[in-house]
Image (cartoon, rainbow, N blue to C red):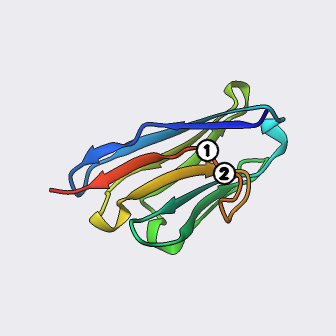
Amino acid sequence: EVQLVESGGGLVQPGGALRLACTASGFTFANRWMYWVRQAPGKGFEWVSSISTDSTTYYQDSVKGRFTISRDNAKNTLYLQLNSLKTEDTAMYYCAKDPAGHDRGQGTQVTVSS
């Protein structure tokens, strides 16, 4: 059974930071591109970042320079470091096996508020 389990979300002030993690099981993690997507209240899923099997990274323009995606294949874990957070980053964040977020975990909530 494929499982993706996110953790690390929380409430943070604008300008703050969080580190999200996603533990994967049930498939060969090292052989898959992986993705972070998010869903803000009342909105659809939005691609945030991707990482290839050789750890080449890609970012949505609005998070470039603030977010960093990484992976540890030995631990079957995907990470997303969120720095300089803004209120508009508030969303449920999901790790996923596809950029549209169809095959995703249960999510972890990130709330940026003063």
- The image quadrant where one finds the C terminus is bottom left
Q: Quadrant of residue 112?
A: bottom left
Looking at numbered disc 2 in the image, what kind of residue is underneath it?
Ala
Q: Residue at x 47, y 41 (%)?
A: 20
In this view, the residue in front, 52 or 110, is: 110
Q: Is 113 placed left or right of 69 in the picture? A: left
Residue located at (66% from left, 51% from top)? 96
Q: Quadrant of the rendered structure where residue 25 is?
A: top right
Residue 30 position, x and y percent, is: 80, 38
- Mark 2 secondary-structure assignment: strand
Please give the count of numbered marks on the rendered protein: 2
Front disc: 1 or 2: 1
Which residue occupies the foreground of this view, 30 or 102?
102
From the top left corner, tell me how far across and down residue 33 is, in percent: 76, 51
Q: Can you give x and y, in whole percent of width and height, for residue 108 in the image?
A: 46, 44
The residue sitting at 76% across, 37% down in the picture is 2
Q: Secondary structure at mark 1?
A: loop
- Considering the image in quadrants, where does the N terminus appear? top right
Q: Nearer the viewer, residue 78 or 11?
A: 11
Q: Return the x and y of residue 16 as percentages of the image width and height.
A: 27, 50
Disc 1 marks which residue? 105
Could you tell whether 91 is left or right of 79 in the image?
Answer: left
Amino acid tagged 1: Gly
CA neighbours of label 2 inside 10 A, class few (<14), some (14 to 19), many (20+):
many
Relative height, residue 101 to residue 82 (above, below): below
Q: State if disc 2 and disc 1 touch (CB < 8 Å).
A: yes
Residue beneath label 2, please? 96
Crowding around mark 1 (Cα neighbors within 10 Å: few <14, some 14 to 19, many 20+) is: many
How far apart are the alpha carbons under marks 1 and 2?
A: 7 Å
